[in-house]
Amino acid sequence: MELKKHLLFALAIPAFAAIAFAAGGGGGGARAGTRGGAPASLLGSMQDMQTMVLALKKDAADPDKIEQTLKVLAQLERDIAIAKMQRPPVDRVPDAEKGLVDYRTFMTVLQRTALDLEDAVVAKKPDEIKKLIAKFDELEQAGHDEFR
Ligand code: HEM
């Protein structure tokens, strides 16, 4: 009887842990996907990108806010990666195949710009920071001109 009790207890611990883990959303990725974290559509990723670019315009050149800016940049890079995984609205352009290629190019240039901006922020180069943020605006303008 005593042995049975111990056995039941031993089985209950991992079961309880599994339920707690599932309720908590599992790993970080699952949590981010289900708890108001990562956007899951092209429009959602774009809207989040806009929020991040606005935050960068406000604070990226401030050397006292480097840690905060690097987090904003990481989120922007995540949003760009999510946008990359979506199918762009190629029905809005005359040549769908070219549209796909152009879209991918826009996204990789955006990613590179974000990475260059990370370097400029860490190196505390305000002129470079402003130049790279202006590039986001140019890319947004060009991308939207083509697709909307
Ligand atoms: C940092 C640069 C960019 C920002 C901040 C940005 C921001 C946005 C925002 C806020 C929207 C939603 C507008 C709305 O609510 O109607 C949007 C939509 C869109 N953007 Fe961007 N964008 C950027 C760059 C680009 C680039 C380079 C492309 C390349 C093609 C692009 C393609 C699109 C498309 C296709 C939509 C429409 C999505 C839909 O209707 O579902 N964007 N963008």
Image (cartoon, rainbow, N blue to C red):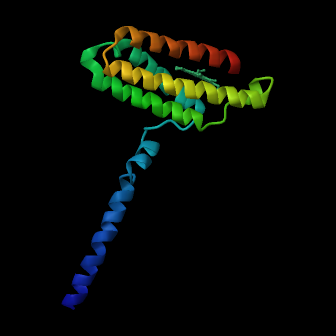
Instruction: Left or right? Give the position of 1 relative to 142.
Output: left
- Left or right: 62, with 30 as reference point: left
Q: Residue at x 19, y 89 (%)?
A: 2
- Residue 1's spot in the image, x, y percent? 22, 91
In percent of the image, x 50 and y 35: which residue is there? 39
Work out which residue is located at the far right of the displayed protein and give it: 94
Quarter of the rendered structure image containing ligand 1: top right
- The quadrant holding residue 144 is top right
- Please provide percent x and percent y for residue 141: 60, 13
The image quadrant where one finds the C terminus is: top right
| Image-quadrant location for residue 51 | top left
* Image position, residue 87 (x, y; %): 66, 36
Q: Is residue 148 visible?
A: no
Nearer-the-camera pick, 128 or 70: 128
- The residue positioned farthest toward the bottom in the image shown: 1
> In the displayed structure, would residue 124 be above or below residue 115?
above
What residue do we see at 39% from left, 58% from top?
22
Residue 40, visible in the rendered structure: yes
Q: Is residue 109 left or right of residue 96?
A: left
